[in-house]
Image (cartoon, helix red, strand yellow):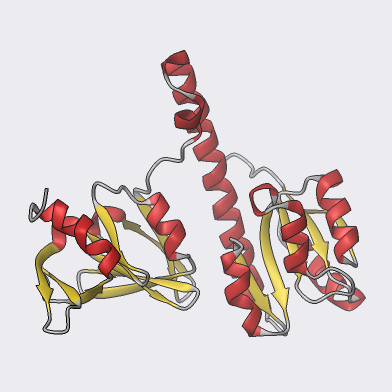
Amino acid sequence: MSQRKPIRVLIVDDELLARQRLEDLLSHIPDAEVIGTADSGDAAIEAIRSLKPDLVFLDVQMPGRTGIEVVRAIGPANMPATVFVTAYDRYAVEAFDMAAVDYLVKPFDDERFEQAFARARRMLELAEVEGLSGRLLAVLQGSSVSAPERNKKPYLERIAVEARGQVRVVPVDSVEYITASGPYAELHVGGRTHVIRERMQTLEERLDPAKFLRIHRSAIVRLDQVDTLVRDPGGDYEVRLKSGVQLSVSRGRVEQLERWMGLSS
């Protein structure tokens, strides 16, 4: 088996003991390499720009700039994979809105840390695979494909979910519908529910629009599972799936759903 490429990690926390604990935890992971630490938001920005780490463990509350402000300064699209570390769970939603890989609420145990690192590793491996695939596609297709098309991420074919310390791969074509639950999304598959840490907006962008439609801010359906569109006396709409599940449809999405069902031109 080939050895994993080291994951270059930057630790950002204004508390010395917190930095030391993360360093100790990372020292027990063979493919983790701590390339630096920072004790403030300004130092974090400088370190991220100069060291270009693969992964950052980023404290949310720090003197001067907070971890959230660090991300804004660098730009979410330019940030390395980020695990937020915070003493306050209320920051979790904002962290995920900024596309964090995960967040750790202090105090966290070793197992929770390992889960966060494993999630970051999978994300980095997936990004590398997608990058290689994109470069290969560009070589094969040459100049016939425009730059925006070459840079477009492929639609999801499978989604990794975790339960009881185990990771399971769920084929996207088996997902009947998806609902939002705070910073989480719930995948509904054959009567079972799998919870993932992902935003609905991200899922909507990564799912094939020929197969999936976001019918509400808190619901995405697989179109071939739609059975009936129902309008109640108050003028609100619901969609009934083949499984019998009924989900609300926002008025702004009704026309798009009707077109797919052949009810309007």
Quadrant placement of the N terminus: top right
Percent x, y for residue 88? Answer: 69, 85
The residue sitting at the top extreme is: 143
Number of labels in the image equals: 0
Residue 154, placed above or below residue 248: above
**Direction from residue 5 to residue 187 in the image, left or right:** left
**Direction from residue 236 to residue 182 in the image, left or right:** right
Residue 104, placed above or below residue 208: below
* Residue 95 falls in image quadrant: bottom right
**Direction from residue 22 to residue 36 in the image, left or right:** right
Residue 81, placed above or below residue 103: above
- In front here: 255 or 44? 255
Residue 240, placed above or below residue 160: below
Residue at horizontal 69%, vertical 69%? 84
Residue at horizontal 47%, vertical 65%? 199
Residue at horizontal 37%, vertical 45%? 155
Percent x, y for residue 153? Answer: 46, 40
* Residue 42 falls in image quadrant: bottom right
Percent x, y for residue 259? Answer: 15, 52
- In front here: 45 or 57? 45
* Residue 65 falls in image quadrant: bottom right
Percent x, y for residue 171? Answer: 30, 55
